[in-house]
Image (spheres, helix red, strand yellow):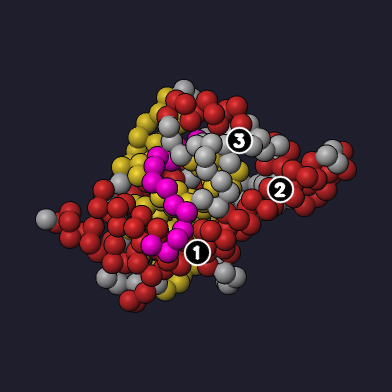
Amino acid sequence: MNSAIGLVIALPAEARALLGRGPWQRQEGQVFRHALLEKGTGLIAVRSGLGMENSLAAGRWLTKKDVAALGSLGVSGGLDPSLEPGDIILAASVAQKSGDTFEQVWEAPPPFVDTALAVLKGRQIPVYRGAIITVQRPLLSARDKKRLFVQTRALAIDMESAGVALAAKEANLPFFALRAICDPATRTLPGDLFNSLDQAGHIHLFHILRILLLKPALVSDLLRAKRDFAAASASLGHAWNVLIKNNLPDLVQSHFREKAL
């Protein structure tokens, strides 16, 4: 299979964890980069920025590039209280939360998920199969995450996967989502720290310094968030090299064969 895989990544730091440092290009409002997977399969990665609107636009742009599949990779918040920073979530389904309602936008073919799960577990990666909920606004408090877990039993939340899944559904393409837990369900992330990110995922250093001067107690939260992000990024990078870089072309090709049959 030589068609490219399309990948949507929200944050620059997530992109570095997966692809390393390198030049990015701009076209039609999208920031993208080409790479090469195994067996001559190409990769087109788009750095979308935060939020479902941005990820949907990035996914739709990728479908115009004749990609064979779409994926959403990055860090996420945990909902299941048993999950720890660095645990990997392989999406079995993706739902969108809008207000108090939930809409499932995608469900994985069992053979695809079973095979991908076996590949990751075979390399001793802490991976769990389950639902991911895409939210419009981040859930930062442990109380809100607990409430959503009780409602849905989903394992993780993000702000992008449903947008990419919808783009894949529109184009009738295979989709996959892989997320690494960054802030666990039992932890509350101060809003001041999250607000230091802009929509493109860039950190406003001046904003962080100002907040820390006003609220010195947040230093410990910042250091903990940095450690958790490092653990999530390292785990995501490991899963990327095992599953996406080396095995995804064969998995997608098998998926096409199953659909054709």
Mark 2 / mark 1, whichever is N-terminal: 2
Compared to 97, does 225 lie above or below? below
131 within the magenta span: yes
Q: Quadrant of residue 139?
A: top right
10 within the magenta span: no
**Between marks 1 and 3, how big is the CA–CA gap?**
25 Å
What is the secondary structure assignment of the residue under circle 1? Answer: helix
Q: Which residue is mark 1?
A: 238
Q: Residue at x 60, y 43 (%)?
A: 183
- Decide: few, some or many residues near mark 1? Use Cα within 10 Å; few <14, some 14-19, many ≥20: some
Q: Which residue is mark 2?
A: 224
**Between marks 2 and 3, how big is the CA–CA gap?**
13 Å
Q: Provide the residue span drawn in magenta.
A: 122-135
Using the rendered image of the protein, determine whether residue 58 is visible from the camera's viewpoint: no
Q: Residue at x 38, y 70 (%)?
A: 246
Q: Name the residue at the right extreme.
A: 213
Q: Which residue is mark 3?
A: 186
Residue 170: x and y in percent read 30, 46
**Between marks 2 and 1, how big is the CA–CA gap?**
21 Å
Question: Are discs 2 and 1 less than 8 Å apart at CB?
Answer: no
Label 1 amino acid?
A: His
61 on left or right of 84: left
Residue 82: x and y in percent read 52, 39
Question: Are discs 2 and 3 less than 8 Å apart at CB?
Answer: no
Q: Residue at x 24, y 64 (%)?
A: 253
What is the secondary structure assignment of the residue under circle 3? Answer: loop
Label 2 amino acid?
A: Arg
